[in-house]
Image (spheres, rainbow, N blue to C red):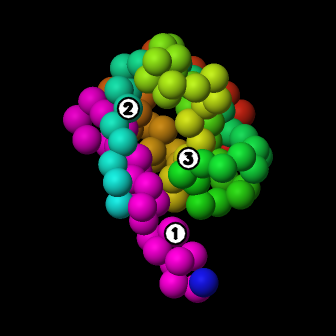
Amino acid sequence: MLAFILVTFIGIYYRIDGDKLVVYTFFIPTAYPIDKIKDIKSTKSVLSAPATSLSQRLAITFTDRKIQKSHMPLLISPVRQQEFIMQLLSINPEIAVENVR
């Protein structure tokens, strides 16, 4: 059980690759276009997501629902949130950032 938990935590990470936000879940990448990000909000949602933290989560909403194939936002928990958001904003300054600490 401990090995499964460790692989889960190690296998979830995020990377900005050019104009794409790449989310790795169990080492499987999923790319999202940064230019389609509408807003980023801080959230305490406990919904299942590629986010390892329960208290430092960000909810990313896209301008096009087809990107996520869901009404729900993408929940992530990058380690250095402010730096991560600044990198996203440097690529797409149109992103609205709300309630982020």
How crowded pointer 2 is (Cα within 10 Å; few <14, some 14-19, many 20+) is rated as some
Q: CA distance from mark 2 to mark 3?
A: 13 Å
Q: Which amino acid, by three-letter code, is at mark 1?
A: Phe
The residue that disc 3 covers is 76
Q: Which residue is mark 2?
A: 32
> How far across and down, in percent of the image, does residue 50 sit?
54, 51
**Is residue 59 shown in magenta?**
no
Is mark 1 in CB contact (under 8 Å) with mark 2? no
Q: Find disc 1 in the rendering and name its residue.
A: 9
> Can the viewer see residue 37?
no
Picture quarter containing residue 96?
top right
Q: Name which residue lies at 56% across and 32% down.
A: 60
Where does the magenta region start and end? 2-26
Q: Looking at the picture, does residue 17 appear above or below residue 24?
A: above
Q: CA distance from mark 1 to mark 2?
A: 21 Å
| Circle 2: residue type | Tyr
Dot 1: element: helix
On screen, residue 30 versus residue 12, left or right, reads left
Residue in the picture at 52% in, 17% down: 65
Report x, y in % for residue 28.
35, 54
Residue 20 is inside the magenta segment: yes
Mark 3 nearby-residue class (10 Å; few <14, some 14–19, many ≥20): many
Secondary structure type for disc 3: strand
